[in-house]
């Protein structure tokens, strides 16, 4: 059975979009683990991306969504963690490919780049897509080899 829990977090620049995506996910039957921020006061994106990426890396949660102004910062921070495949997406095609080809377990969106309607559609497509395996598995194995050689990064 599919795990319907999704962690979600943002900095101040992504908070408004985070709240909209939360509404969409709850109405779609998902259980949200909201890890902040809850205000528009300026915050540092690593303070919110790190706890989410840690949960995914440790296997405590299977999938997550991170949002900051452009999505770039959250992508960088999340991908420092072993086993995390955070994909910054900007349309439905990249959202689908993030899952089908890269088995992305964290979806990253730029709150100042993507509108609410498109963001909802990207989330829907990502959640409904499945990893294709095959040649893509071989590529992910190569990434895991790098992680194994480096050991725990954090």
Image (cartoon, rainbow, N blue to C red):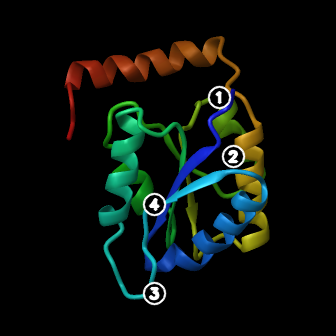
Residue at 58%, 31% (x, y): give it. Answer: 102
Residues marked 1 and 3 touching at CB (< 8 Å):
no
Residues marked 1 and 4 touching at CB (< 8 Å):
no
* Residue 43 x, y percent position in the rendering: 33, 78
Q: SS for tag 2?
A: helix
Q: Mark 4 vs mark 3: which is more N-terminal?
A: 3
From the image, state whether disc 4 or disc 3 is nearer to you. 3
Image quadrant holding the N terminus, namely top right
Residue at 21%, 30% (x, y): give it. Answer: 152
**Marks 2/1: CA distance?**
10 Å
Indicate the quadrant where residue 4 lies: top right
The residue labelled by disc 2 is 94
Q: How crowded is mark 4: few (under 14 residues within 10 Å), some or many (20 or more)?
A: some
Q: Mark 2 vs mark 3: which is more N-terminal?
A: 3
The residue labelled by disc 4 is 72
Indicate the quadrant where residue 147 lies: top left
Q: Residue 40 carries which label?
A: 3
Q: Residue 101 carries which label?
A: 1
Q: SS for tag 3?
A: loop
Q: Mark 1 vs mark 3: which is more N-terminal?
A: 3
* Residue 54 x, y percent position in the rendering: 33, 44
**Marks 1/3: CA distance?**
35 Å
Q: Mark 4 vs mark 2: which is more N-terminal?
A: 4
Q: Is residue 83 above or below residue 125?
A: above
Q: Mark 1 vs mark 4: which is more N-terminal?
A: 4
From the image, state whether disc 1 or disc 3 is nearer to you. 3
């Amino acid at each position: 059975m599919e795990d319907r829990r999704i962690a979600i977090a943002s900095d101040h620049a992504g908070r408004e979009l985070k709240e909209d995506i939360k509404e969409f996910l709850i109405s779609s039957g998902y259980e949200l683990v909201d890890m902040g921020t809850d205000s528009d006061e300026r915050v540092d994106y690593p303070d919110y991306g790190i706890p989410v990426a840690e949960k995914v890396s440790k296997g405590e949660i299977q999938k997550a969504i991170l949002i900051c102004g452009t999505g770039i910062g959250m992508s960088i921070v999340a991908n420092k963690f072993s086993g995390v495949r955070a994909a910054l997406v900007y349309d439905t095609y990249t959202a689908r490919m993030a899952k089908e080809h890269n088995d992305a377990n964290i979806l990253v969106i730029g709150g100042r780049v993507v509108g609410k309607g498109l963001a909802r559609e990207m989330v829907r497509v990502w959640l409904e897509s499945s990893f294709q395996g095959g040649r893509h598995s071989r590529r992910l194995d190569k990434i895991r080899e790098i992680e194994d050689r480096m050991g725990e990064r954090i």
